[in-house]
């Protein structure tokens, strides 16, 4: 089992008047090579779930095993290593570093991996060519459109060839055509063997995934397999 | 991540945010340069007034004595000082001559900086720290014989004779020929109002020019500061014998007082202590202002930087890598700022010395420079490191959400 969470809670302001149960006892397993869409209304806890799965946040209670390892027992260095090598993140707001150009942004995770420079260049260009943004390598995020920025973000996520891709509303800020391209990349990556976790509130987007997990008020209310709408 | 990589990353970040880097540097440059300049110029002022008295000669006793009958006490005092040879090196009247000195087409009354003309004894040079460069000094014989001779300071000699040798030449003093017998060595260069711009005449020669010389003011040069005290006490005793008790209102004979450099030194020391208090205050305020500038820039960008740290953490940067990168970044920016600050401060100090301290070549003090650089750099590094230490300790998702 690649990802295995058992009875996970994320509670903000526990015990106070303003207590929010963003995750309210979630149990979920994801196998290697799956394409899972997590759907639900705004505020249902999708992002909270992804942040915990991506080791960007810690649950209030419950256990999380990634590749059989209990995340709770890992050091900062080990968690950083997992985020760096195992997971590629794609965010709704791209999260590129403004002071760096496209090439440098894509290169960043490889630097933290200590990949030697000559190898880095190949990997960066390969990822950028793959998402069709190689000709913009010199541009700063502020000099690119939203779609272009999201491609750079995808290139950054796939440059390290991570086994898991996590995307939180990756098409949220894009028009439907550009959004479709992004979803196409995710399907391609999944075909090549990557595990993809896609967060969305849009059922038509969830249709691109083999498995749909629906959450509401921090609880999983549906978990089913479906026919895939190949792009 | 390796250190070399952290360094490259830091440099990329510096050049990637030029405005931020520049503003931070500017805070440091201004802080360092202003402290250096202000403190150095103030120190230069204090040093200059100290140096003036050093060059003029230390361990001096100023004696002011006269008799109501109009007779001079100088000759008696001169002899008494010879008798006090263990303590006293020389004695001279401090008289001024107002006269016009002409040589060829050079005329003292039409010069930009006309020379000071002094009437002295053969010991004038000892008392005032002059040394003969060529020719000879005034002698006792010149004084006793009312000789029409004079000795020139280096600057005065240059003003009258350019670079030719004045020794043996004749100048006209109020129309009367005087022979230049010697030139003193330069002791006060780089100063428009140089102590070298003088002409010294035997005090007796004033009579030949039909002038009456006020001999009541006398300088006595003592061997050391202990001698000053001894000589002061002895001279006071001696003068009480001649002029009577100066504190006695019924005294009909005369009046005197003595004043030593020691007294002056004391008040100077008090002033210097006061000055360093003021200096400390000014330096503190300048550093504070510079520091607040640095702090501002660093804190204004802290949100942006916190988000950046969140991104770096999300893609796998360890806490250590981020702190290392930010440390190098802040250190580099502050170091470069410090270097430029020192350069600017040095230039401003030199300009300030030129404009405010009579053309003095003033270098900034090493202590102040190091202090200012150290303070600014440490402050800059602390505030540069602050977001790194704070944000890298957060859960990445919290840093990413920073607003
Ligand atoms: N830092 C926080 N403090 C308090 N409550 C929070 C915090 N973060 C999230 N929440 C709450 O947790 C719940 C789930 O938030 P989450 O961001 O996971 O929703 P979401 O499903 O991703 O919604 P959306 O589709 O709008 O992105 C929400 O009710 C939100 O208000
Ligand atoms: Mg969300």
Image (cartoon, coloured by chain):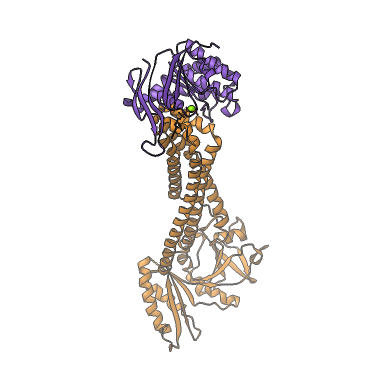
Chain colours: A purple, B orange
Residue A32: name its quadrant: top left
Q: Is residue A26 above or below residue B231?
A: above
Furthest-left residue in view? A73
Q: Nearer the viewer, residue A201 or B398?
A: A201
Q: Is residue A192 above or below residue B74?
A: above
Residue beneath the point at 57% across and 20% down: A179
Q: Is residue B333 above or below residue B346?
A: above
Residue beneath the point at 52% across and 26% down: A92
Furthest-right residue in view? B105
- Give the side of residue B104 with respect to residue A193, left or right: right
Q: Could you tell me residue A1's position as x and y percent?
A: 36, 15
Q: State the count of labels.
A: 0
Q: Is residue A126 visible?
A: no
Residue B164: name its quadrant: bottom right
Q: Could you tell me residue B150's position as x and y percent?
A: 55, 67
Q: Nearer the viewer, residue B375 or A139?
A: A139
Q: Could you tell me residue A65's position as x and y percent?
A: 34, 20
Q: Is residue A106 above or below residue B246?
A: above
Q: Nearer the viewer, residue A66 or B357?
A: A66
Q: Is residue B16 visible?
A: yes
Q: Nearer the viewer, residue A167 or A215?
A: A215
- Give the side of residue A149 with respect to residue A192, left or right: right
Q: Could you tell me residue B339's position as x and y percent?
A: 49, 41
Residue A76: name its quadrant: top left
């Amino acid at each position: 089992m690649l990802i295995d969470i058992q009875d996970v809670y994320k509670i903000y302001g526990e015990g106070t008047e303003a207590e929010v149960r963003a995750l309210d006892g979630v149990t979920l397993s994801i196998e290697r090579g799956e394409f899972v869409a997590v759907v639900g209304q705004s505020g249902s806890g999708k992002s909270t779930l992804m942040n915990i799965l991506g080791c960007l946040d810690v649950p209030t209670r419950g256990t999380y095993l990634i590749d059989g390892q209990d995340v709770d027992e890992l050091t900062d260095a080990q968690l950083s290593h997992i985020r760096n090598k195992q997971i590629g993140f794609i965010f709704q707001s791209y999260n590129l570093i403004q002071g760096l150009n496209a090439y440098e942004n894509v290169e960043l995770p490889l630097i933290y991996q200590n990949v030697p420079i000559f190898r880095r260049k190949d990997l960066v260009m390969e990822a950028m060519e793959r998402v069709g943004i190689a000709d913009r390598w010199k541009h700063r995020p502020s000099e690119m459109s939203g779609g272009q920025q999201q491609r750079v973000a995808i290139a950054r996520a796939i440059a390290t060839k991570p086994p898991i891709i996590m995307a939180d509303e990756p098409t949220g800020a894009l028009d439907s055509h550009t959004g479709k391209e992004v979803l196409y990349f995710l399907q391609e990556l999944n075909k090549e063997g990557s595990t993809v976790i896609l967060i969305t509130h849009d059922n038509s987007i969830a249709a691109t995934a083999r498995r749909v997990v629906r959450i509401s008020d921090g609880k999983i209310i549906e978990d089913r397999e479906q026919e895939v709408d190949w792009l | 991540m390796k250190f070399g990589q952290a360094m490259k990353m830091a440099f990329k970040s510096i050049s990637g945010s030029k405005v931020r880097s520049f503003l931070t540097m500017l805070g440091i440059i201004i802080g360092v340069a202003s402290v250096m300049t202000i403190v150095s110029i103030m120190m230069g002022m204090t040093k200059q007034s100290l140096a003036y008295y050093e060059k003029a000669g230390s361990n001096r006793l100023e004696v002011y004595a006269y008799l109501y009958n109009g007779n001079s006490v100088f000759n008696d005092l001169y002899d008494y000082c010879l008798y006090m040879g263990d303590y006293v090196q020389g004695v001279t009247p401090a008289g001024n001559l107002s006269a016009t000195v002409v040589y060829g087409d050079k005329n003292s009354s039409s010069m930009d900086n006309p020379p000071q003309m002094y009437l002295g004894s053969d010991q004038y040079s000892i008392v005032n720290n002059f040394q003969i460069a060529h020719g000879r000094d005034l002698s006792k014989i010149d004084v006793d014989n009312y000789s029409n001779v004079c000795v020139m300071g280096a600057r005065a000699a240059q003003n009258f004779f350019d670079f030719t040798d004045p020794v043996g030449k004749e100048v006209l003093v109020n129309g009367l020929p005087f022979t230049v017998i010697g030139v003193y060595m330069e002791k006060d260069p780089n100063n428009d109002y140089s102590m070298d711009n003088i002409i010294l005449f035997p005090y007796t020669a004033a009579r030949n020019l039909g002038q009456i010389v006020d001999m009541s003011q006398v300088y006595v040069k003592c061997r050391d500061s202990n001698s000053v005290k001894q000589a002061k006490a002895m001279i006071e005793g001696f003068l009480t014998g001649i002029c009577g008790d100066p504190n006695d209102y019924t005294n009909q004979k005369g009046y005197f007082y003595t004043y030593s450099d020691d007294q002056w030194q004391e008040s100077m020391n008090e002033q210097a202590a006061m000055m360093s208090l003021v200096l400390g205050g000014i330096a503190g305020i300048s550093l504070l202002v510079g520091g607040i500038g640095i702090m501002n820039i660093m804190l204004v960008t802290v949100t942006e930087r916190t988000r950046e740290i969140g991104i770096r953490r999300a893609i796998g940067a360890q806490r250590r890598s981020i702190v290392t990168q930010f440390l190098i970044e802040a250190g580099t920016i502050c170091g470069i700022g410090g270097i430029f600050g020192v350069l600017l401060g040095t230039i401003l100090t030199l300009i300030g010395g030129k404009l405010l301290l009579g053309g003095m070549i003033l270098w900034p003090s090493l202590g102040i420079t190091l202090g200012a650089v150290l303070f600014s750099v440490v402050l800059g590094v602390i505030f540069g490191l602050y977001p790194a230490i704070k944000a890298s300790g957060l859960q990445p998702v919290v840093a990413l959400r920073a607003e």
